[in-house]
Image (tube, rainbow, N blue to C red):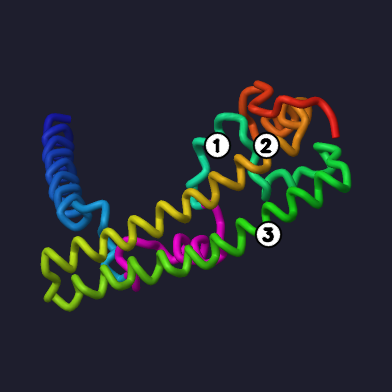
């Protein structure tokens, strides 16, 4: 029995040592949250990010509006039946969405191009401080315009809905049941 316990202890020590070495090796191999992202065409953007930006999707830009009771046109159209939109409301929201989508796609393409230019400048290993200022300024300006487009669409959509419709929207989206910004009761 003593020999068996000694063998078990040795085996346990070997397993623990092997696990520690294995874990240490894994930690060394994956020390950066950026691991694997060096293969991206544009370092700062995933392929999903690029697709979303080029498609004019929200990319989370409108969260301040969405989470504070200002419905987004895309989601309002998705929920049109639940919200019991009138034909006039649906047409108004569709116009808002179409305008937003057109602008967001154009700006999304510009933003992807700006990020690509910044990435290429670093990849060329010849970027200067002045180029960095220009390229990051261009990307930031486009991103701000893109965010404004999405937020403005929410701002424009909110008054199209009644308080009741906004409450239904918020509930359907999983938010609090506050009435939101809509101040009128009928269309």
User: Start and end of the magenta stretch?
Assistant: 40-58
Residue placed farthest to the top in the image?
A: 178
Return the mark for residue 98.
Answer: 3
Give the alpha-carbon distance from disc 2 to disc 3, as whole Å: 16 Å
Task: Work out whether mark 2 precedes mark 3 in sequence or the reverse, and give the earlier one.
Answer: 3
Determine whether the residue tagged by mark 3 lies in a helix, strand or loop. helix
Looking at the image, which residue is at 36% across and 57% down? 141
Depth check: give the residue in front, 150 or 24.
150
Q: Are marks 2 and 1 in contact (CB under 8 Å)?
A: yes
Residue 68: x and y, percent? 56, 29
Looking at the image, which residue is at 49% across and 62% down? 53
Give the alpha-carbon distance from disc 1 to disc 3, as whole Å: 19 Å
Determine whether the residue tagged by mark 1 lies in a helix, strand or loop. helix
Residue 102 appears left or right of 54:
right
Task: Work out whether mark 2 precedes mark 1 in sequence or the reverse, and give the earlier one.
Answer: 1
Depth check: give the residue in front, 96 or 172.
96
Return the mark for residue 65.
Answer: 1
Residue 34: x and y, percent? 26, 57
Residue 8: x and y, percent? 18, 37
Residue 55 counted in the magenta span: yes
Looking at the image, which residue is at 86% across and 38% down? 84
Residue 6 appears left or right of 93:
left
Q: Residues within 10 Å of mark 2 (few under 14, many from 20)?
A: many
Q: Are marks 1 and 3 in contact (CB under 8 Å)?
A: no
Q: Are marks 2 and 3 in contact (CB under 8 Å)?
A: no
Task: Work out whether mark 1 precedes mark 3 in sequence or the reverse, and give the earlier one.
Answer: 1
Q: Which residue is mark 2?
A: 158
């Amino acid at each position: 029995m003593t020999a068996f316990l000694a063998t078990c202890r040795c085996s346990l020590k070997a397993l623990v040592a092997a696990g520690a070495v294995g874990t240490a090796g894994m930690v060394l191999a994956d020390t950066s949250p950026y691991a694997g992202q060096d293969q991206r065409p544009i370092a700062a953007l995933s392929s999903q990010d690029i697709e979303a930006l080029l498609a004019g999707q929200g990319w989370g830009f409108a969260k301040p509006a969405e989470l504070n009771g200002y419905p987004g046109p895309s989601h309002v159209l998705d929920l049109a039946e639940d919200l019991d939109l009138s034909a006039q409301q649906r047409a108004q929201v569709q116009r808002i969405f179409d305008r937003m989508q057109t602008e967001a796609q154009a700006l999304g393409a510009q933003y992807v191009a700006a990020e690509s230019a910044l990435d290429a400048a670093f990849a060329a290993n010849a970027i200067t401080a002045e180029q960095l200022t220009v390229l990051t300024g261009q990307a930031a300006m486009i991103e701000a315009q893109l965010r404004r487009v999405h937020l403005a669409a929410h701002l424009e959509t909110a008054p199209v809905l009644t308080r009741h419709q906004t409450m239904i929207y918020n509930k359907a989206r999983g938010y609090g049941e506050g009435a939101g910004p809509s101040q009128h009761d009928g269309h």
